[in-house]
Amino acid sequence: MSGLTAYDPYEEPRPLGPFSGFFNWAADLGRVLIESVEVLGGFALFAWQTIGWLLSRGTRRDTLMPNLYQIGVLSLPVIALTGMFIGMVLAVQTYYQFRQLGLHTTLGSVINMSLVRELGPVLAATMLAGRVGCSMAANLGTMRVTEQIDALTSMGTNPIHYLVVPRFLSCLLMIPALTVMGDFMGVVGGYFFSVFVFDIDKYHYWYHSREFVGAWDLFSGIIKSVFFGGAIALVSCHRGFNSGAGAEGVGRAATSSFVYSFVMILFLDLILNLILDGIASAIWPEGAKFI
Amino acid sequence: MVSHRRYGLRARSSYKAFTQVSKPSFIEIYDVNVAFGAQPVLRDIRLAVPRGQTLVVIGESGCGKTVLLKTLIGLVRPQDGEVLFDGRDLHTMSERELTQERARYGFVFQLAALFDSLTIGQNVAFPLRQHRRLSEREMNEIVLDRLEEVGLPDSVVDKKPAELSGGMRKRVGLARALALDPEIVLYDEPTTGLDPIMSDVINELIIKTRSRGDVTSIVVTHDMNSAMKIADRIVMLYPLARLRPHEPQMIFDGTVEELRQTEDRRVQQFIRGEAGERLNELRQESSRRKSASER
């Protein structure tokens, strides 16, 4: 015999004596820790399998193209709009403070540096996590609860290879392009507000931008975006694959995919900033702006 | 692991002795135990299904019928025990081997599980695209053949699953399951939610499928009319929560005639659809649940 006995969730619990409150607290803490380790382990395995399938077998064109279109082309308007408004908001926020210091002609350097290094990649990734990540989690979650993922497996198709790899690859390929678009529109928005609304001389605007913003700044932003894209795809697909039952479970998967993706984006942003700045200072001790 | 293997071999030899299976078994499971978290669902299940047999698994909701079906194709991994498909243990195969073996199966899901982003034609062609190198023309021919077999017109090919009725979706699910000419077809509650006429259409299709070259069928259902009509053999599972620790979970294994004549009160109650003391049991369970939540 296996030793398994009938489970009764409503069985009267054994009395724990005067320390029952402490024991309950310890049991709850233990349960949360075990569940957290399980989720992290499950996510690590999921990511490992995705990368393994990506490297070991090609992705079919008919599964990749719809995802590239969905993630790249359909996200373009919202990313462009967000980028433009961020550029304009940056101009408004910094103009009055810089003017008090008499530095308003250097506005271009602040706006464009913030955009290409930080705000462009992070906001493009955040928009992607909201627009694409939630949709992926809801889509895969629905497939899970309606047994479509089981149907795939039963037909001898690996669901990670068929469903996750194209989404992961599309995010990796499209997010750098979207980030560049967001950066560009931010630069345009910032320029428009600074030059045409705040009447800053355009020569000085571009001169200071060129002085402070180098190719490395743009490049580091794009490198970061690739990691953000990978994290969004993995987190969202993992949430969808592990969706709970029913509409509530799918809704929770979609919400948690955005929350976890956003936390991952911020965490990766911090780590990658440290790493990329370390690399830049090792290669160009004088500063990377002249490359 | 070693002790488990020894135990498995011992169980297998004794099981074969008492079942006296004349044909070699196509699917065999030995001492399979499945639990989800702390909740056991299947306990020490042993079953051998010869090639070409139609086995119907009956039992009330929550007794583990669907879990058993999913264990047979490797969608659910048992905590303990062996699942042999054509003599090989599914759960010791590599991912690649398992993928190849699954092409020999067809699985008809309870709600059809059609891919809602694909058309009906693409759904039926899906396993062909994954496992066969065929031209578009050959693939279209097979798709139309399979749809015709299940009584669906060519006009459904370009429709999406959401545009079809429940009965039509189930038949598309069957057409998809048959696309690769499987050696075994697993049906999960194929007639649930259908009107009596459409249920009988599905029964006829299951019988017709069996005649397509010695196809083995395993059908999970609560529909006794369907079970009586299609079964060569019937097994009945009982929910673990209502069994004592050492009672067997499979409470009946025999032919349709033997099922009718059995004196087991639980089996008779099920096939006649009589609630008996069940309502009182459910009330007791509900009050225990309420008192547990108040604690």
Image (cartoon, coloured by chain):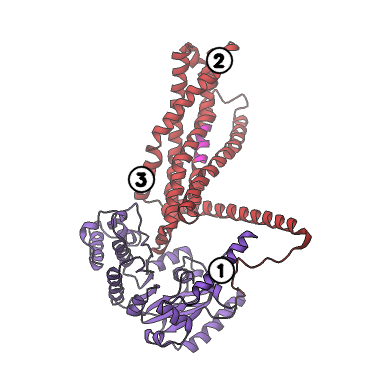
Disc number lying in front (3 or 2): 2
The magenta region covers: A220-228
Kindly identify which residue carries mark 3: A66
Q: Residue at x 50, y 69 (%)?
A: B91
Of the residues shown, which amino acid type is indicated by label 1? Glu
Residue sitting at x 46%, y 44%: A134
Decide whether residue A237 is among the magenta residues: no
The chain carrying label 3 is: A
Q: Which mark is residue A96?
A: 2
Task: Tell me the amino acid under the disc marked 2.
Answer: Tyr
Q: Nearer the viewer, residue A216 or A284?
A: A216
Image coords of residue B290 (percent x, y): 59, 62
Residue at horizontal 56 percent and vertical 55 percent from the top: A42
What is the x, y in percent for residue A15? 73, 65
In the rendering, what colour is chain B? Answer: purple
Q: Quadrant of residue A29?
A: bottom right
Chain name for mark 2: A
The circle drawn on residue B285 is: 1
